[in-house]
């Protein structure tokens, strides 16, 4: 076997796996849309519109300036909340994860708190922060913070201790330790944490907008639910899905690339 053949062969299985990761979800999506369309045709009711009708209704909604303002409000608030989730949750997870004492002390408490359904705590946010964007962004931040923190905490606790001892023997400063040793080992973990926490942050924001919003996609969705506008509801669900999928798929792609390069 030639050297060229030997260098190419090991990459084929991972190429096949990458192909499967792309094709399988796409095939599932096609099947789901086909099932939706077939079901709508069989039922033939205004209560259950086809995908085409839902998309057409969404297009009409997007021509309305008020609806576009709601979309912009959701995207802006999501960006703010998610940015704080990544920065605060990531930093706290790394700092506490590298400290054995605080990691062992706080982990059980945070895991217990994370098991509580966050929506039951939303009235507390309303009580202290009132109605409006501040309580919505704060709740979305809280919804995504704990998963981000916990994933980074576990990842930091798994950093190679031999490398940390070597850095200590070289009297490396803490910022240099984090930059040169910790961060390179935590990039895959960071991407995973960002992907998981994004979806939860988005869910928290939509729920908050549904409960107390006067704008935003959650508010628009609830308004259409109360008026039983199924085409509008499904169109907005599609829009929310697209907004959620774009960064999620991008983060998953970079996560797989980083893990493949690390092998």
Image (spheres, rainbow, N blue to C red):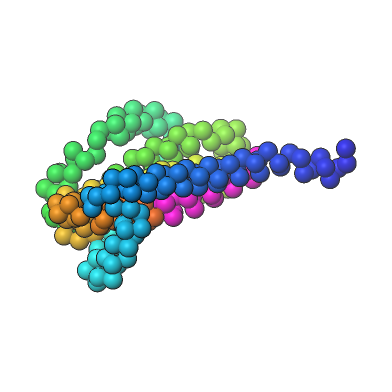
Name the foreground residue: 238 vs 66. 238
Q: Is residue 26 above or below residue 97?
A: below
Residue 180 x/y as whole percent = 58, 48
**Prevalent SS, magenta region:** helix
As drawn, 207 above or below 155? below
Tell me the quarter of the picture where residue 114 sits. Answer: top left
Give residue 250's position: percent from left, percent from top.
49, 53
Which quarter of the figure has residue 72? Answer: bottom left
Residue 38 position, x and y percent, is 37, 46
Q: Nearer the viewer, residue 261 or 203?
A: 203
Answer whether residue 255 is magenta in the image.
yes
Residue closer to the observer: 239 or 228:
228
Is 191 inside the magenta-drawn segment? no
Residue 45 visible in rendering: yes
169 shown above or below 173:
above
Residue 197 at x, y = what percent? 38, 45
**Residue at the spot 44% in from the left edge and 55% down from the top edge:** 246
Screen quadrant of the C terminus? top right
Report whether residue 96 is seen: no
The image shows a total of numbered marks equal to 0
Depth check: give the residue in front, 247 or 153. Answer: 247
Which span of residues is magenta-colored?
244-263
What residue lies at 29% left-to-right and 52% top-to-bottom? 49
* In the image: residue 104, left or right of residue 23: left
Q: Is residue 248 left or right of residue 139?
A: right
* Quadrant housing residue 213: bottom left
Quadrant of the snapshot with the N terminus: top right
Q: Give the residue drawn at x 33%, y 40%.
A: 146
């Amino acid at each position: 076997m030639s050297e060229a053949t030997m260098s190419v062969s090991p990459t084929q299985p991972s190429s096949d796996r990458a192909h499967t990761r792309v094709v399988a979800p796409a095939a599932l999506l096609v099947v789901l849309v086909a099932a939706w369309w077939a079901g709508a045709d069989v039922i033939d009711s205004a209560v259950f519109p086809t995908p085409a009708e839902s998309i057409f209704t969404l297009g009409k909604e997007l021509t309305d300036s008020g609806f576009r303002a709601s979309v912009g409000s959701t995207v802006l608030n999501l960006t703010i909340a998610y940015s704080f989730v990544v920065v605060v949750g990531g930093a706290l997870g790394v700092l506490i994860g590298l400290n054995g004492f605080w990691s062992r002390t706080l982990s059980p408490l945070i895991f217990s708190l994370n098991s509580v359904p966050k929506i039951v705590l939303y009235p507390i946010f309303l009580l202290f922060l009132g109605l409006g964007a501040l309580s919505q962004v704060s709740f979305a931040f809280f919804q995504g913070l704990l998963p981000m923190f916990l994933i980074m905490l576990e990842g930091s606790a798994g950093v190679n201790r031999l490398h940390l001892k070597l850095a200590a023997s070289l009297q490396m400063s803490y910022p240099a330790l984090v930059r040169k040793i910790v961060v390179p080992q935590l990039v895959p973990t960071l991407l995973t944490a960002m992907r998981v926490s994004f979806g939860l942050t988005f869910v928290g924001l939509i729920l908050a907008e549904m409960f107390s919003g006067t704008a935003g996609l959650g508010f628009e969705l609830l308004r259409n639910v109360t008026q039983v506008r199924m085409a509008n509801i499904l169109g907005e669900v599609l829009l929310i899905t697209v907004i959620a999928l774009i960064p999620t798929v991008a983060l998953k792609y970079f996560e797989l690339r980083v893990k493949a390069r690390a092998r």
